[in-house]
């Protein structure tokens, strides 16, 4: 029996933060969410209240089922058949995220790095390292996060510092003059609904070292993500202005193109690419691994490894379909019309079902949880 890999709270934090930062780093969807004006930064701050509210059911489940994996949690709560059924949408979501994020990444590379590059080649170049890392498992992914995410965070701080001379703080004025309370809350909700990284905690907290707190790690990850998100959003607004930033396909990249360092270092956007692409690859690795791990548990396979290649093949084939390769499709996939509405059932409705049933059957389920924990400890000795 293979020993279960162990990850630290820092590694789990970096995985969640790195994955969450990819969207604002890539296209800042909040700019086109209500109120879609200079007050979007207020909606961003409000979004973290909604994130906490939306994540509470699953966070409670994770703490109660500590040491129990995702499939075991669903089956203990709902029974063998219904537990598997309820995880099918979760697996489909992982595959959807992998496919959509891979396409968005390919479009960005084609637009800004290799114009005219064939889509199949870009997809293939991404799928190879993604499949290998996901195949190697949780320990490898955690170590990759240690290498990739700190540099991405560092790059955001550097771009903020070198952007200060270009800042026009009047770009976010007048504050709250053109926004309604309802618009701010709608924008905050849609932004919060994009935060699917709670699923990373659900899958990977199973590997978290026993002395680490899930709640503290989650809170720290959310705090780091919030601070970094603000360091991306505000400079973009200060330098580009709201209207221009909303029109740009990648507003943060466009912002970094305006910068120079020490009066002679230009083309700082190259560092943007160096920081962004590994983080985007890490996000793809995470969703590929989570999809393959949960799927292998549902079908009671001995290993997740074969399913890594199945998910990679599905994403590759889907990415080559003509209707998926249209700019209108990509715009739809990354819009508030699609992404948040797909995430909500996965991170809220399914955990609520698990929570309600658990509370009803608590006296019967708790001893089984303890039994699984005990057997796991015996196996690791």
Image (cartoon, rainbow, N blue to C red):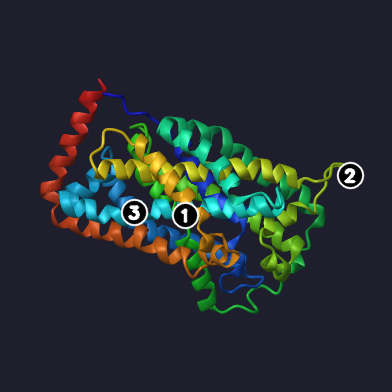
Q: 105 or 225, which lies in front?
A: 105
Name the side, left or right, on which 278 lies relative to 372.
right
For mark 1, does the 10 Å Cα neighbourhood hold few (<14), some (14 to 19), or many (20 or more) residues?
some
Pick the residue in front: 219 or 133.
133
User: What count of labels does the image hold?
Assistant: 3
With respect to residue 98, does 36 lie above or below? below
Instruction: Give the camera-side residue of 109 and 87.
Output: 109
Q: Which residue is mark 3?
A: 90
Residue at image coords 30%, 51%: 60
Q: Secondary structure at mark 3?
A: helix
Residue drawn at x 45%, y 53% as measured from the top left = 97
Res 98 visible: no
Pointer 2: residues within 10 angstroms few (<14), some, or many (20+)?
few
Q: Secondary structure at mark 2?
A: loop
User: Residue tagged by mark 1?
Assistant: 318
Q: CA distance from mark 2 to mark 3?
A: 50 Å
Query: Which marked residue is nearer to the observer: mark 2 or mark 3?
Result: 3
> Label 1 near label 2: C-beta < 8 Å?
no
Tell me, for residue 263, which label it has, or none.
Answer: 2
Q: CA distance from mark 2 to mark 1?
A: 46 Å
Mark on residue 45? Answer: none
Please name whichever residue, 246 or 326, is drawn nearer the observer in this view of the structure. 326
Going 47% across and 51% down the picture, which residue do you hit?
317
Question: Residue 148 at x, y = what percent?
Answer: 58, 36
Q: Are marks 2 and 3 in contact (CB under 8 Å)?
A: no
């Amino acid at each position: 029996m293979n020993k279960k890999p162990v990850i630290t709270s820092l590694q789990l934090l970096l995985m969640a933060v790195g994955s969450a930062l990819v969207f604002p780093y890539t296209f800042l969807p909040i700019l086109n969410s209500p109120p879609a004006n200079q007050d979007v930064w207020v909606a961003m701050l409000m979004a973290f209240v909604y994130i906490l509210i939306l994540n509470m059911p699953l966070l409670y489940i994770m703490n109660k089922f500590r040491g129990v994996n995702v499939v075991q949690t669903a089956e203990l709560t709902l029974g063998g058949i219904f537990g598997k059924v309820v995880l099918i949408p979760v697996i489909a979501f992982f595959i959807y995220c992998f496919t959509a994020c891979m396409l968005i990444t390919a479009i960005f590379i084609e637009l800004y790095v290799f114009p005219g590059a064939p889509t199949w080649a870009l997809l293939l170049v991404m799928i190879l390292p993604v499949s290998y890392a996901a195949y190697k498992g949780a320990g490898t992914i955690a170590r990759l996060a240690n290498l990739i995410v700190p540099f991405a965070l560092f790059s955001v701080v550097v771009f903020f510092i070198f952007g200060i001379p270009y800042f026009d703080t009047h770009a976010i004025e007048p504050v709250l003059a053109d926004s309604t309370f309802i618009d701010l809350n709608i924008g905050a909700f849609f932004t919060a609904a994009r935060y699917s990284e709670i699923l990373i905690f659900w899958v990977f907290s199973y590997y978290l070292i026993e002395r680490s707190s899930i709640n503290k790690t989650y809170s720290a990850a959310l705090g780091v993500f919030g601070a970094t998100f603000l360091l991306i959003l505000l400079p973009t607004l200060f330098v580009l202005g709201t209207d221009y930033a909303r029109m740009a396909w990648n507003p943060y990249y466009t912002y970094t193109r305006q910068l120079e360092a020490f009066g002679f270092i230009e083309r700082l956007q190259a560092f943007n690419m160096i920081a962004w692409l590994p983080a985007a690859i890490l996000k793809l690795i995470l969703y590929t691994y989570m999809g393959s791990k949960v799927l292998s548990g549902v079908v009671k396979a001995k290993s997740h490894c074969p399913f890594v290649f199945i998910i990679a093949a599905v994403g590759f084939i889907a990415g080559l379909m003509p209707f998926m390769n249209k700019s209108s499709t990509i715009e739809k996939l990354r819009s508030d019309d699609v992404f948040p509405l797909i995430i909500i059932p996965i991170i809220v409705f399914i955990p609520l079902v698990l929570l309600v049933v658990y509370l009803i059957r608590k006296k019967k389920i708790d001893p089984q949880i303890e039994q699984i924990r005990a057997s796991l400890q015996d196996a690791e000795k």
